[in-house]
Image: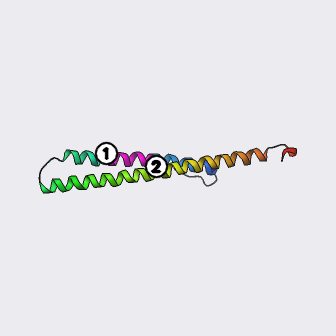
Amino acid sequence: MNDPAAPVSHQLALVVRDLAVVIGRLTDAAAAARGLSAATDWQSAAAAAFHERAEAWAGEVSGLVCLAESARIDACHARDRAALREADAYAAAFAPAGAR
């Protein structure tokens, strides 16, 4: 569960972790669709249609993997920037009085 009182960098770390899980699941789904498509070697019209739709769906899911990976990378960058800001604020709060 996300703690609203947690530092932003920790909240973004959870986003990064959850996106990594989503990416793994999407990758597995695309692989499963491609496996089903490859296993469909019948020559009937229905089998050919299934094969075509399974391949198209796998391609769409693979596109979602790319989108999720881009979001994960953006979240990583935001997490790192937030951590730096938090570290700077912490250092400023505990700096000697003459250094402020």
- Helix, strand or loop at mark 1: helix
**Residue under numbered circle 1:** 31
Report the predominant secondary structure element of the magenta stretch: helix
Residue 25 is inside the magenta segment? yes
Q: Percent from the top left, x then y, of residue 44?
A: 11, 54
- Helix, strand or loop at mark 2: helix
Earlier in the chain: of badge 2 and badge 1, it is 1
Residue 7 is inside the magenta segment? no
Q: Percent from the top left, x then y, of residue 67?
A: 44, 53
* Farthest residue, direction left: 44
**Residue under numbered circle 2:** 69
Q: Which segment is the magenta one?
A: 21-30
**Residue type, mark 1 in image:** Ala
Q: Is residue 35 left or right of residue 22?
A: left
Q: Residues within 10 Å of mark 2 (few under 14, many from 20)?
A: some
- Asked if disc 2 and disc 1 are in contact, CB closer than 8 Å, the reply is no
Residue at (43% x, 49% y) in the render? 22
Residue at (20% x, 54% y) in the render? 50
**Residue type, mark 2 in image:** Glu
Q: Percent from the top left, x then y, of residue 79?
A: 59, 48
Q: Percent from the top left, x then y, of residue 17?
A: 50, 46
Residue at (13% x, 56% y) in the render? 45
Q: Is residue 35 left or right of residue 84?
A: left
Residue at (84% x, 44% y) in the render? 99
